[in-house]
Amino acid sequence: MPSKVRSKITNVQVLHEDGRLEKGMVLIQEGKITYAGPENGAEAEQVTDGGGAVLVPGFIDLHVHGGAGHDFMDVSQEAVDAICRFHAAHGTTGLLATTMTAPIEKTEEVVAFYSRLARSQGAAVLGLHLEGPFINVRYKGAQNGDWIEVPTMENIRRVYAAARPGLIKLMTLAPELIQDEPVLEWLTEQGTIPSVGHSDLDYHGGCRCMKRGLSHATHLGNAMRGFHHRNIGIIGLVMEQPEMTFDIIADGIHVSPELIRLLVRICSLDQIMLITDAMRAAGLSDGRYELGGQEVHVKGMEARLADGVLAGSMLTLDKALANLIKFTGLPLAKAVQMLTINQARKLGLADRKGSIAVGKDADLVLLADDLRVLATWVNGEQVYQELNDR
């Protein structure tokens, strides 16, 4: 054991599990947090002076397709590294590489690639999120309807045959299309979170599916049956059922700020998770790009198909956090849980990730007063910096 710890982050406000600690510090050894508390004069091989900024847990994105000109469907190390570096610069320390509806053979190829993936630069790939192909064509959104498949056990087992155990963390599907097969139960047994999305499932069907394992909703309000006063749909279901979690795209485009404010007031904050749904154009200029084999037109913060349908987003999680605070008035300590510990709990990783505590992975983000990301650490390694080390 070396006489000095490997690294130290000092002169920071530490946003930990019990609140905010002014003039705090964090010590890191072998990728883990060994101390988080008041400055104690400990020496380290590498010291970062945070300049009084706020140190928060690393952000976790459950739904991200790409960025910096690349897509996770590109199945190359170059693409993975470029996407993960880009999002790490915006505070993301862990993510689920998210697929698009594609021919089932392509989906098998993608799953097989990520089964072999050993590493990534920047944010860590924590697993896969399969968004399709088992969705409802009526609510396909920007997914290609030609490649949609029925969610049968045969089709789903075919995809899972290409996956290493535990790889597929989340699957977005249309539960109303399941025909008397134990799909939801089986997914849960595999360690996959079944999520309703791109779906016509109504409130009553949602209640039935919850008894079979449904526990999450994908980009709430988008690509699903809407709220109606005689059938409150999945939006109403999450308002009523605190055990039903959901994610939301807080760009002010996919759903209105008013809905986000309403959800924050009605739902438990433990239910809500911010996602980006970012596509390959995130971080790039306006123009024409590709998503799921379809041309996407990007202008400002909007990405749309030729027919005007929203096609992913240009969002990053630091911007989503800033928007959430702007839309709702929540303090940072409350808002940040919707990018960190909520996701960690949902993925079964809360013993390692999602908060700043001794023994947890040193996944950390340093934020300026304007919520600009100054530095990002993944497993104790600094993968992005705007600051200079001392």
Image (tube, rainbow, N blue to C red):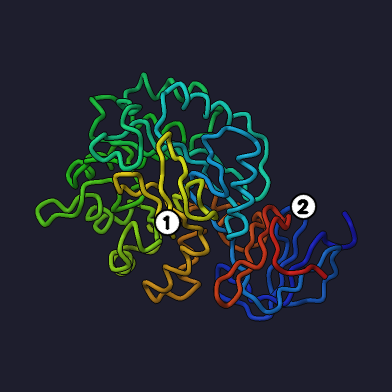
Judge whether residue 111 can be spotted in this image.
yes
State the mark number for residue 30: 2
Quadrant of residue 263 within the rendered picture: bottom left
**Residue 299 numbered mark, or none:** 1
Residue 182 in view: no
**Numbered disc 2: secondary structure:** loop
The picture quadrant where one finds residue 196 is: top left
Give whichever of 16, 369 is nearer the camera.
369
Kind of residue sitting beneath label 2: Glu
**Farthest-out residue, left:** 230
Q: Residue at x 28, y 24 (%)?
A: 181
Instruction: Using residue 37 as the reference point, say whether residue 130 is left or right of it.
Output: left
Residue 342 drawn at (x, y percent)? 46, 57
Image height check: is 148 above or below 308? Answer: above
Give the position of the C terminus as an image quadrant: bottom right
> Residue placed at 68% from the left, 75% from the top?
12
Residue 317 percent location from the top left of the image: 51, 59
Q: Earlier in the sequence, mark 2 or mark 1?
A: 2
